[in-house]
Image (spheres, grey):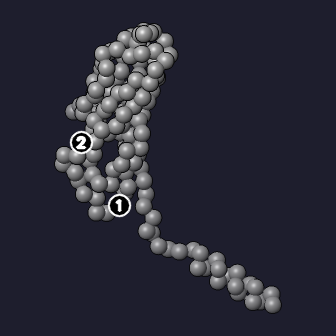
Amino acid sequence: MKKILSLLSLFIVLISCSTDTDETNVRYELIPIQNVTISDHLLVGEANQITVQYNRPSDCHGFNGFYYEKNGFTRTIAVQNYVYEREGCSPLTNELREEVLEFKPTEVGTYTFKFWQGKDSNGNDIFLELQRDAIIE
């Protein structure tokens, strides 16, 4: 009986160690923002919508949220995509996507928004900078 259990255990271990590599790896990358729509002023304590547009590079890219950094009254924002690393990804030449970020200011003041638009030829980050006043209505 012990031999049968040992052989059965060995068999289960061997079949569970598959060498198939059908697993798809995923990585994340920031995608440059092309356009931004934001109201002229923001309401304190309210969810204000900021609409951003970006070009989806390939059919292996998908929206994964926003990179969002807060420093005082400055907000740095970029679109984050997941990328499936697999063969057969088709590049997309003009697939403009639109996503909405809700921003809820907590205090009155002037907020600076830095929307990441990629890198220049020297590798420096490029930002579209917009300033908006947050007011109480």
107 over 55 or under it: above or below: above
The residue labelled by disc 1 is: 86
66 over 14 or under it: above or below: above
| Disc sitting over residue 96 in the figure | 2
Toward which corner of the image does residue 13 lie, by quadrant? bottom right
Mark 2 is surrounded, within 10 Å at the Cα level, by few (under 14), some (14 to 19) or many (20 or more) other residues, namely few
Q: Residue at image x 24%, y 57%?
A: 90
Q: Is residue 119 visible?
A: no
Determine the CA span between mark 1 and mark 2: 22 Å
Picture coordinates of residue 16 (x, y %)?
A: 59, 75
Toward which corner of the image does residue 3 lie, by quadrant? bottom right
Q: Residue at image x 53%, y 74%?
A: 18
Q: Residue at image x 65%, y 80%?
A: 12
Q: Which residue occupies the extreme left position in the image?
A: 93
110 over 9 or under it: above or below: above
Picture coordinates of residue 112 (x, y %)?
A: 36, 16
Element under disc 1: loop
Q: Is residue 69 visible?
A: yes
